[in-house]
Amino acid sequence: MPLTKFKEFAPSVVQLNDAEIDNPLSVPRLEMASEHICGRHVKMIYAPFDHINMSARVIIVGMTPGRFQATNALRAARDAFAQGRSLEEAAAYAKAHASFSGEPMRTNLIRMLDSIGLDKWLGLSSTATLWSERNDLVHFTSALRYPVFVDGQNWSGTPDMVKTPALRRWLEAYTGQELRSLPDALLVPLGPKVAAAMQAMAAQGLVDERRILAGLPHPSGANAERIAFFLGEKSAESCSIKTNVAKLSQAKAQLQAQVRTLTPV
C-alpha cells in the first residue's frame, strides 16, 4: 500500500514544534475529519501509522491509537526527517516507536497467544519473539487506523464503529484497505468490539473470515480475572459472576482448534 497519507502530511509533520506534538488535537493542519454524532464531537487526526510490514504472518489489531501513541509517532517521524531519512524509512521508524507495546498488555497477550498454539504455528519458542528478533512476522494496526477522539478524549468504542456511518467509513477506507494488502496473515483482534469490526469487514469481502482469531479476552489489566481463567490459572468456581466462564472456555477451545488446522509457517 503506498504511503499516500504519510506523503500528504509529511510537510506538516516536519514543521511541528514540541508544544504541537504534545497536543496534536489542537493542530488544525493535522485534522482529517470532524463529525457531530449524537451530540458528541468525534474527531480524527493524522499521526503516522501508515507503514505496513509486508512480511507479516500475524496482525495484532487494537482499537485506535491514543493521544500518547499519536504524540510518539509524530515526534519519531519529525526526528526521522531531521536525520535525513527517506519517506519509507521515516514511516517505518515512526510506526516502530509508537505501536502497541505496553508491558502488562503485551505480557498478557503473549501468554494467551502461546496458550492457543500460535507460537508453535509460527515455529517460535514463544510469541514473545514477535516483539524482538522475529518482529518481521508481525504487523500492528488498529480498527480505526488514525487516532480518533470523542469530546477531546481517546475514543474507547462509543460511538460504535460498525453502526456509526462516519466511523464505519473510516474503518473500511483505511484499515480495510490496509488489511487487504496482507491477504495471508492471521488477524488477532483485541477485544469484542474490534472482533465485531473484523467480522463486519469480512462480510464486505475486505478480509477472509477464516483468518480472524476472535475470542481472546482483551489483554488489558482490567480484564485480569478473564485472562487468568482463560490461561487456566483461576478455576470457574472462584470467578465472579461478571466472568462468563462458559463463553471463555468455548472461545479457547475454538481458537486452539482453529490454529491446529492452519498450515505451518
Image (tube, rainbow, N blue to C red):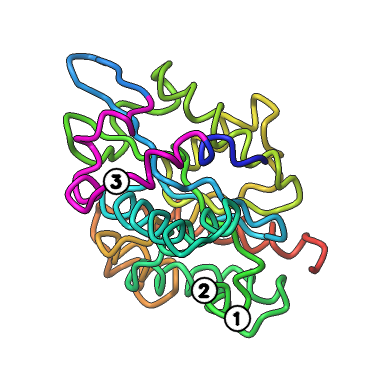
Asked which quadrant contains residue 11, the reply is: top left
Furthest-bottom residue in view? Answer: 125
> What is the three-letter code of the residue carrying label 2?
Trp
| Residue appearing at x 72%, y 71% in the figure | 121
Q: Which residue is mark 2?
A: 131
Spatial separation of the CA atoms under disc 3 and disc 2: 29 Å
Left or right of 121, for residue 190: left
Which one is closest to the eye, mark 3 or mark 2? 3
Q: Secondary structure at mark 1?
A: loop
Q: Earlier in the sequence, mark 3 or mark 2?
A: 3
Furthest-right residue in view? Answer: 263
Disc 3, disc 2: CB below 8 Å? no
**Taking 125 as reference, is 56 above or below it?**
above
Left or right of 200, for residue 29: left
**Residue extent of the magenta highlight:** 8-32
In terms of depth relative to the viewer, which is nearer, 126 or 243?
A: 126
Q: Which residue is mark 3?
A: 16
Q: Position of residue 67 (x, y in %)?
A: 26, 48
Left or right of 265, for residue 246: left
Q: Position of residue 169 (x, y in %)?
A: 49, 21
Spatial separation of the CA atoms under disc 1 and disc 3: 33 Å
Q: Which residue is mark 1?
A: 133
